[in-house]
Amino acid sequence: MASLPTPITPVTSVTPATPTTTAAPVKTEKPLPFLFHFTAGGIAGTSEILVMYPLDVVKTRFQLQVSGAGGEAYTSIMDCFKKIIKNEGFSRLYRGILPPILVEAPKRAIKFSANEQYSTLFKKIYGKDKMNQSLSIQAGISAGCTEAVVIVPFELVKIRLQDKGNAGKYKGTFDAITKIIKHEGPLALYNGLEATVWRHATWNGGYFGVIFSIRRSLPKAENKQQQLRNNFIAGAIGGTVGTIINTPFDVVKTRIQNDSGTVKKYNWTLPAVKIVAQEEGFGALYKGFVPKVLRLGPGGGILLVVFDQVTTWMKKYLL
């Protein structure tokens, strides 16, 4: 019997398997720890004050100059510089710098690190993924209040040393601290706390709020030089706006902290603003504005540039 033919199995073409590709994981930028922000802020603040401090001395002299009170009067920034250097010596432009140097690292460190912490907090509270201008202002004000509590004693000592009338009263920073505590009590170092809160809350709110807006308005940086330019412009404009807002509070803070008498003319901020405006005119609330804005305008730019450069370096080499 013949065997049946073996059935032919149809050949099916085999499609080569397409290799599966795994998407590369998206690299998210690791946030800097609090200590890194604190350190970067301290470096930025110290850099700014070393460059701009003489203008702070001039600002204080103008703010302590009461109309019609007699004594040496300053007619302009250059006039003030010339008279200080001629009559008191060049080193007087840096008198009182030790307290702000001692506090500048923690002061600016708190400004930037607290602003970062409050930014994170407010994003959680409001359920936002990114910052907006309103949140930037709120975070800045909160950071300013925190900063103010830390720096009050240093500010008070600095102002006492900068006042020409106290030239023979205090030999230096530690002598001033000792005499203030001895004659006025330890709590005297916190005279002007409320005014300092007003000053820093308004400046920081204006500074960080404006920085957010200006950065969004400027052309996107395509290289390091353009990034530096954008940061300086945003910081300088932010510093100028903050100074415009907070100068009246700065004037009364200076008056409150320089008053070592038993019966004080200036006590609380808003009543003091009213007294100065009534007795000396509204313009007196902006005494020292020009040297102050010349310092804190560019100074705000220096702060932001240095802070950004230091944090960028930290992210590259330390994380």
Image (spheres, rainbow, N blue to C red):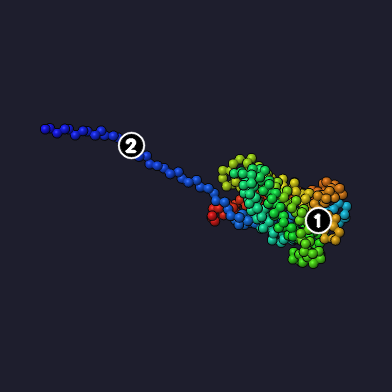
Identity of the residue drawn at 82% across and 60% down: 260
Which residue position is annotated with label 1? 256
Q: Position of residue 252 (x, y in %)?
A: 80, 52
- Identify the image quadrant of the N terminus: top left
Whether residue 62 is visible to the viewer of this picture, yes or no, is: no
10 Å neighbourhood of mark 1: few (<14), some, or many (≥20)?
A: many
Q: Are marks 1 and 2 in contact (CB under 8 Å)?
A: no
First in sequence: mark 1 or mark 2? 2
Query: How would you rate the neighbour count of disc 2 (Cα within 10 Å): few for under 14, some for 14-19, many for 20 or more?
Result: few
Residue 83 bears which disc, if any?
none
Instruction: Give the percent coordinates (x, y) of residue 245.
Output: 75, 46
Query: What is the x, y in percent for residue 116?
Result: 63, 51
Q: Nearer the viewer, residue 70 or 235?
A: 235
Is residue 259 among what the camera can see?
A: yes
Image location of residue 179, percent across then percent down: 79, 66
**Vertical relation: 102 (above or below) 123:** below
Location of mark 2 (residue): 15
Q: Amino acid at mark 1?
A: Ile
Q: Secondary structure at mark 1?
A: helix
